[in-house]
Image: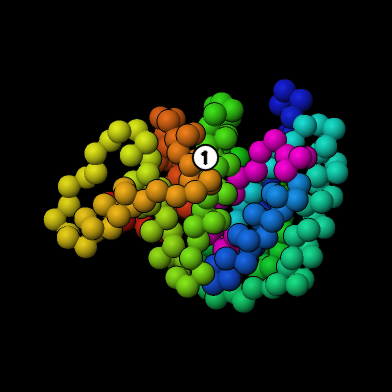
Amino acid sequence: MYINDITWHCFSVFYARKNIAALLNAINDFYEINKNYLTHLSFYFSNQQGERINLVFISEKQHSEKLVAFIEEYFERFLKEHPSESLYPIPYGSIIWLPYPNNSLIWNGFHIPRFLFESREVRDFSQATSLLIANLYDTESSYNENVISIEMFLSVQLWKQQNTTLPITTNPELAETLQSYWEYEDEDLLATWRQQAKIDNGTFIIRSHLDLSGFLNFKL
């Protein structure tokens, strides 16, 4: 899709969440290798038709064809060298469309999040959020544990940046965790992210990246 002489690419990697840390590292490496060709990269966890990560790449038109070739070659090699073991149950009889095969690649298999079209500032925040998620992901914890803890951490950091007070909770363990997240100060990626965290719909964007649809009862 071409908009204002930039090209938007939608690309999905179907990969078991059990092994998702390896894919996040690969995405991070791909960005570092090819960032001169990229105007934007962001990714979004999803569970539609299989466990997957949806990636949005934006490039200038003259780099589009080369970037597509880089994407296909890089992730095909990754899947060949680091296949994941799927535990995703196929709900035969309860769905119309069967899941895509695990360890497969699909172009144009999802809709680009609408907020990416709002402004360059939103796209920069979304990219920074993706890179931060990839670096915050704890290989010793489960996917579900990571999603909840990362969402909580980024929400607290967002509130801090926007001068919003922490919510009141009667759970002392949760209160201690929130306070530790509030007091956390660190390094380049987080500092860069916080500089871009002044947009109005930051919490919604964070939750979109992490696909919290499977955690309907989760609230801070």
Give the tally of numbered discs: 1
Instruction: Report the residue at 33% width, 52% height from top.
Output: 181
Residue closer to the observer: 179 or 107: 179
Mark 1 element type: helix
User: What is the crowding at mark 1: few (fewer than 14 residues within 10 Å), some, or many (at least 20)?
Assistant: some
Q: What kind of residue is marked 1?
A: Thr
Residue reaching furthest to the left: 170
Q: Quadrant of residue 9?
A: top right
Instruction: Report the residue at 53% width, 32% height from top.
Output: 122
- Asked whether, in this view, residue 53 is left or right of residue 36, the answer is left
Residue closer to the observer: 165 or 11: 165
Q: Mark 1 — residue? A: 192
- Asked whether, in this view, residue 128 is left or right of residue 6, the answer is left
Q: Position of residue 111 (x, y in %)?
A: 60, 42
Q: Position of residue 104 (x, y in %)?
A: 71, 64
> Which quarter of the rendering shows the N terminus?
top right
User: Height in image: 147 above or below 103?
Assistant: above
Q: Position of residue 61 (x, y in %)?
A: 81, 31
Residue 115 visible, this orientation: no
Q: Position of residue 86 (x, y in %)?
A: 59, 74
User: Height in image: 45 above or below 63?
Assistant: below
Residue 167 visible, this orientation: yes
Instruction: Report the residue at 49% width, 57% height from top.
Output: 136
Instruction: Report the residue at 67% width, 60% height from top.
Output: 26
Range of the magenta residues?
35-52
Inspect the magenta stretch and tell me whether residue 46 lies in it: yes
Inspect the magenta stretch and tell me whether residue 143 lies in it: no
Residue closer to the observer: 186 or 25: 186
User: Height in image: 194 above or below 96?
Assistant: above
- Asked whether, in this view, residue 157 is left or right of residue 119, the answer is left
